Amino acid sequence: VAAPLKFTSKAQGKVTYAKVAKGSAKCLTVNKTTGKVTVKKGTKKGTYTIKVKVKAAGNANYKAGSKTVTCKVAVK
């Protein structure tokens, strides 16, 4: 199961995603380039939390920026 994050529609420059270990479930991972959150096979039903740090590199007109986002994932 994977769901893309849609928090960067106005980002400038290269966008990267990183899982924040503290406060994130171990059964969830995030793709560094696409932002897709994946649930590991065999995960039990329930609601899990993942914290993702989203970074935009910026460009000549915009400074680099980042934001940490918390998402809840329901496994059925």
Image (cartoon, rainbow, N blue to C red):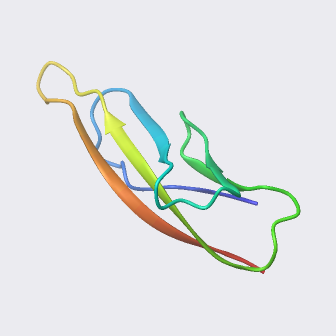
Q: Residue furthest right?
A: 42
User: Which image quarter holds the N terminus?
Assistant: bottom right
Q: Residue at x 78, y 55 (%)?
A: 40
Which of 6/32 is in front? 32
Q: Residue furthest top?
A: 60
Residue 15 image-quadrant placement: top left
Q: Quadrant of the C terminus?
A: bottom right
Relative to 44, 29 lies left or right? left
Which residue is depicted at the point 14% across and 29% down? 63
Residue 65 % position (x, y): 22, 37
In the depicted structure, whether residue 71 falls above or below residue 76: above
Q: Position of residue 53 (x, y in %)?
A: 39, 46
Instruction: Please give the count of numbered marks on the rendered protein.
Output: 0
Q: Residue at x 29, y 49 (%)?
A: 67
Along the line of sight, the residue nearer the viewer: 25 or 12: 25
Return the x and y of residue 72 as percentages of the image width and height: 53, 72
In the displayed structure, 30 sits above or below 32; it is below
Q: Residue at x 61, y 49 (%)?
A: 36
In-front residue for pair 57/39? 39
State the image coordinates of residue 6 (x, y, percent, origin top left).
Answer: 45, 56
The answer to whether residue 60 is above or below residue 8 is above
Q: For residue 32, which quarter of the picture?
A: top right
**As drawn, 20 above or below 71:** above
Depth check, front residue: 26 or 53: 26
Query: Which corner quadrant of the image does residue 56 belong to?
Result: top left
